[in-house]
Amino acid sequence: MFRHTLSHCMVAALFMIAAGTALAAPTVCPIDFEGLPGAQADMSVPTWDCGPLTVSFSTTNPNPCVPYLGDWGEPGQGWLCNQNGTNDVTIPPYSGGLWFLTWVACDPRANDMVVEFSQVVERFEGYIFDIDDGWAEEEFIIRAYRANGSIADQMTVNRFSPAGGGDCGVQHWEVAGTGIKKVTFDGSKPTDNLGFGIDNLEVTYDPAQGPGINKDLTNIGTIDAYDVSIVLKGSHLTSWEHMGGFKNFFTQPYPFPGGSNTLLKWSYFVDPNNPDQDPDPIRPGDMVHIGWQIIGSDGIGTILDMYWTDEDGERILGSKICQTAAHFVYVGGTPIFSLANDFVPDSDFGDPVPLTIADLFFQIRPEAIDLDSLNLDNAALNAAFESIPGTWTIAPGESISVDIPMDVPADQYILARYTVDCPNGCAGVIDFVQLPTTPDDEIPTLTEWGLIIFVMLLMGCMAWVFVRRRKMAAVSI
């Protein structure tokens, strides 16, 4: 059953007990083009599948193209590494391997090779080598970017780098950091049409698809919208985004520049049913899908504001998409699902409002599912939900919680689906939330300081009750 906001004492204890999370072991995905099915010279390679992680290869404008396979084979089949006039070159760690990835025909002076990841990675490494000789005047800068455009790491490679050597200039490279979403290979410095190859790549990432949220949003306003913007409390980096037909996504400080909160923005919507118009408006009655996962915290963050924007990317006057924040925690061994009303629309567009929660459903799964699959289009997923009838109102700044009416074993995943509404809202909102349960042996415990603070709060509450009773007793006398 739902219980309204807990007392201040209990809330303090709840937050201290929940202040921890289990970390999954990282996974290494090898990318070796010798293992590409049907490999042949000049074959384009737009993506590489690493299970839950997809790696995409492209180039930047102008004259974009898809990187393609070169080889160490016969002349005319691809690009050769000619060392001392010999085409038969064994270059560690290839040991005679055939295929590598290149984009020399794309004119690298005008293009960077771009490698993008469907979720954040911790490390990207491999081997780079010159394939057209003469590295003395050539230099490549490898940069790793986070989703907000900041640089996580970078490395400069050339013939004279510590690991370089020989006419082929083979060397190992590596970029690492928190929240890497994109890596670029910038070869625009040289004066000639240089090229290079990369091979024997490795991507290190966390495969967990744990905490995350997907939203089905229906435009219930009276005018067309074009983009969706969300403001999260605090500074965050996303580890995954569901694009749902939008071509572009970015994050930046809010307010910009220098703000302490984070703006998430999806833009340039393309309706698959109307490919001739680009971008498409989100017309009244149309539904779009977006989703995200952030690094750290609970994977979702505290949503302060959400709204539609117009064709110029500006907030539609009066636009307000009402939102709630979902959390899961064990309290005294009991699994609790809570929803909080932290929604604070921009002061120019309205004050905090009560939120109405309805159509609540739950299911428990032994493993996380792909966050892209959390939507109304997934018939099998939606058929497995169990309904909890009722409608609940959350006042501004408060929360509600529910004892989940089913067995919730440790080390499982809770999926919840519900609708969110509010006065004068401009969107019909259906939230899909996936939250991991905490394994029994990893349930966080109070630190010494946490225990001290908890005891002080408990003593303070007891003292307040004692004083209040004495006053009531004195009045009765």
Image (cartoon, rainbow, N blue to C red):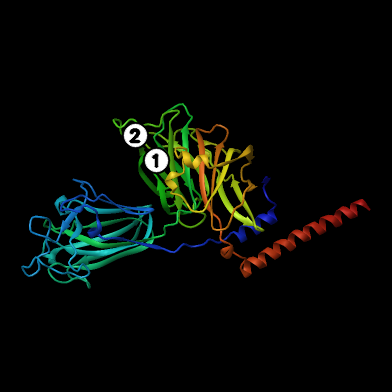
Relative horizontal placement of residue 332, taking residue 250 as reference (left or right):
right
**351 and 435: which is toward the camera:** 435
Task: Find residue 272 and name its label.
Answer: 2
Q: Which residue is drawn at 18% across and 45% down?
A: 63
Task: Find residue 288 and name its label.
Answer: none
**249 and 126: which is toward the camera:** 126
**Residue 231 visible in the displayed image:** yes
Q: Is residue 459 above or below residue 119?
A: below
Instruction: Identify the amino acid type marked 2.
Output: Pro
**224 and 331: which is toward the camera:** 331
Q: Where is residue 388 in the image (x, y as percent from the top left)?
A: 62, 40
Q: Where is residue 166 in the image (x, y as percent from the top left)?
A: 14, 71
Q: Count residues near mark 2 (Cα–Cα under 10 Å), then give few for <14, some for 14-19, many for 20+.
A: few
Relative horizontal placement of residue 379, taking residue 128 as reference (left or right):
right
Give the distance between the C-alpha atoms of the residues marked 1 and 2, in whole angstroms: 10 Å
Q: Is residue 263 above or below residue 430?
A: below
Q: In which quarter of the image is the N terminus?
A: top right
Q: Residue at x 49, y 29 (%)?
A: 220
Instruction: Identify the amino acid type marked 1.
Output: Gly
Marks 1 and 2, the one that precedes in the sequence: 1
- Looking at the image, the residue that sits furthest to the bottom is 162
Residue bearing the label numbered 1? 244
Q: Position of residue 467 (x, y in %)?
A: 82, 58
